[in-house]
Amino acid sequence: MPTQETFYGQILGQVIRGRREVLGITLLAMAESVALATPSGWSRVETGDTAMTVGQLRKAAKKLGMEPAAIVRQADVIASQLEASGIVVHDDKPKNVGKWLLGGAGILALVAGAAVAASKMTSEPSDEKEPEK
């Protein structure tokens, strides 16, 4: 069986996507909040196809009513869970992504499921800021 692999940017993007979807925020609203020209540009950030800047992370977190550190903590937890289950998590996007594109869809589903679950937990009442609409 081939090794299943993902990378940290993909996990981070899926944490953001999960929270965005739980809150009902559109791709267009997220793109506008981080000063990207198109929703597809933000979609590429969420899938890990395009790297996110620290400034974009901060703006996205604000839009989601979270601190950037909370997003990174969730991504760290998910990365650890994936690694514990035998999935290789690269720190950076590998140059030879094509070798595991088919596995990538399955990994993306695992990451997205874990990110949505984590986002729902953070949607419970807490002392974090309310999301901007």
Image: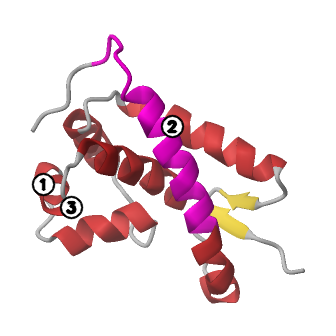
For the point 31% across and 68% down, the residue is 43
- Please provide percent x and percent y for residue 33: 13, 49
The residue that label 1 is drawn on is 29
Q: Do the numbered discs 3 and 1 sit on residues whose CB atoms are within 8 Å?
A: yes
How busy is the neighbourhood of tag 2: few (under 14 within 10 Å), some, or many (20 plus)? some
The residue that label 2 is drawn on is 118
- Please provide percent x and percent y for residue 42: 26, 64
- Please provide percent x and percent y for residue 47: 43, 67
- Amino acid carrying mark 2 in the image: Ala
Horizontal side, residue 132 vs residue 53: left or right: left
For the point 64% across and 37% down, the residue is 77
For the magenta stretch, what is the residue range?
A: 107-128
The residue that label 3 is drawn on is 27
Task: Kindly indicate the quadrant of the structure image that contains residue 69.
Answer: top left
Task: Kindly indicate the quadrant of the structure image that contains residue 107.
Answer: bottom right
| In the rendered image, the vertical position of residue 99 relative to residue 131, given as above or below | below
| Colour pattern of the rendering | secondary structure
Q: CA distance from mark 2 to mark 3?
A: 20 Å
Q: How many marks?
A: 3
Which label lies toward us, 1 or 2? 2
Give SS at disc 2. Answer: helix
Give SS at disc 3. Answer: helix
Identify the main secondary structure in magenta: helix
Please identify the residue farthest to the bottom as the structure is shown. Answer: 98
